[in-house]
Amino acid sequence: MPRKPSKPRNHSAIKAGARARRAPRARRAPRAKGALREAVLYARVSSKDQEREGFSIPAQQAALRAYAGEKGFRIVHEYTDVETAKREGRKEFGEMLRFLKKSRTCRVILVEKTDRLYRNLKDYVTLSDLDLEVHLVKEGGVLSEDSKSAERFMHRIRVLMAQNYIDNLSEEVTKGMRQKAEEGYWPSSAPLGYLNRRDGPKSFIVLDEERAPKIRRMFELYDAGTHSIPQLVKWAADEGLRGRRGGPIRTSVVHRALRNPIYAGVFSWAGRIYEGKDPTIISRELWERVQDRLDGHPYTREVVHQFAFTGLITCGHCGWAVVAELKKQKYIYYHCVRRCQKERFVREEKLDEMLGELLKPLTMLPDVADSLVVSLKNARKDIRADAEVRLAEARAKYDRLGRLIDGAYEDKLEGRIDDAFFHRKRGDWEAKRDDLVREMDRIQKAEAGSIDLALRVLELANRAYSLYKSRDLAGKRELLDLVVSNCTMAGGVLSPTYRNPFDLLVKLSPGPRGGMTPSGGPDGVDPEWWRRRESNRRHGAVQSTEALATASQNVRSS
């Protein structure tokens, strides 16, 4: 089949269509003969430090204005930025781009050098699409569409070098901050309550004598339960506590401060937790109590009346706190703070009875209690012997590390190892020796009086219900705080969370008909307490003693 003859191409139309598809550019207006060419001036510094190093904006502006006078330019706008050019989005740089896109007469930028204008490829490409002349005064070059390919190539190289410098600088800064954190010092700007200080090349944080006491007081008020976070905001305003830049303290600032562990000597950096060596504002115990309150009771009500059981119970339906309310100045009712429709109001007298029932499971059968007491007393020698073995092992490791340090020092003096290797290994060994010292201290504290503390816990648990019935409301709350960490109420039923080791003792609780023997172990003792009776009758009791001794540090004698 014969092919149809093709139509002759209209090359003029093809060129016109190609021009139409190009991105629109501002058309240059004709310039009167002898008139000065219009130009914009751009100056930038990254930080205040560059002001001291001779890169100040006034110095750049003076040099660029002098250049404009020599070359016959009339500066129509001046743009200045005080921020890094490693990312796009600078405010004045963006304003300059908007002006140049609209202007038909101004197509020239005067700038000191490449890295003052941009340090990233995106800004370079954006300017390249605008058909501009860029005068790099300090570098002695002019970049335009008429520039030779070699000049454009060299300019791109300078842009890449500027970006690489910033990337490398960022890596070095990050590395230095991580190293500082590993040494135990906060590596960034000071949190509220601290101030940044510099001693030569070293920087560190110190206590802010004006704000640090107020930060401590803020933790104490929240720990006492007398102030919620909004009330702390008002308290901060009344006390004149301001932010680092002088602004008022907001709710988010107070919440972040209460959550920040650096005040107690611990901080988080790059996903890791570090033991800090910076000065502390509060104790670790105070910080942990505040975290417990934040986790369990985020909306502390203003205390007008002292109710016995507030802060102890949460709603089992919605998870909010169960609070008290005084009716007719006579009756006290407890209810969900959201007034959850699924849970009814409970009179304080009824709640008192329900809470007392939670202590009954701690009462052990007489033969079980006697067996545990005998086992714990017999275990005293085993615990002391075990502690001595652990101490001997820790001391041997400690002495061996000391010999390694001494040997490495002699090798350094003889030239068998260099200083860098010696200092690195000595640092590792000394850190391990510090860990061993802490371990030996823990072993000695755990051994000293651990059995006596465990026996006191057993005695308290066995008498908990009778003690509860004989005390006033304040004494009952004190006893509940020792035994129970939290309760949930759903359908009029309380579900307790017992503190350690009382949760273990509940497994030995009596049941119906005067006492149900716990299953799973000989003589009615749970396997958690008494495991291999045939080989070692004290094995389970010894393990339980360690749990009892750990928890009983906070138990006061009744």
Image (cartoon, rainbow, N blue to C red):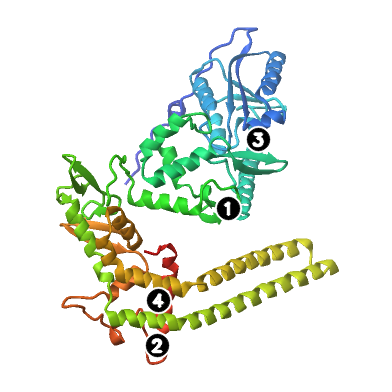
Q: Earlier in the sequence, mark 2 or mark 4?
A: 2
Q: Nearer the viewer, residue 487 or 332?
A: 332
Looking at the image, which residue is at 16% across and 39% down? 328
For badge 1, the amino acid type reads Gly
Where residue 22 appears, as percent x and y from the top left, is 46, 29
Secondary structure beneath label 4: helix
For badge 3, the amino acid type reads His
Q: Is residue 500 left or right of residue 382?
A: left
Q: CA distance from mark 3 to mark 1?
A: 47 Å
Q: CA distance from mark 2 to mark 4?
A: 13 Å
- Which residue is disc 1 drawn over? 276
Label number found at residue 537: 2
Where residue 102 appears, as percent x and y from the top left, is 48, 19
- Which residue is disc 4 drawn over? 544
Crowding at mark 1 (Cα within 10 Å: few <14, some 14-19, many 20+): many
Q: CA distance from mark 3 to mark 4?
A: 75 Å
Where residue 325 appears, as percent x and y from the top left, is 21, 43
Where 322 sits versus 465, above or below? above
Looking at the image, which residue is at 37% across and 36% down? 231
In this rendering, the label closer to the viewer, 1 or 4 = 4
- Which residue is disc 3 drawn over? 155
For badge 2, the amino acid type reads Arg
In this rendering, the label closer to the viewer, 3 or 4 = 4
Q: Earlier in the sequence, mark 2 or mark 1?
A: 1
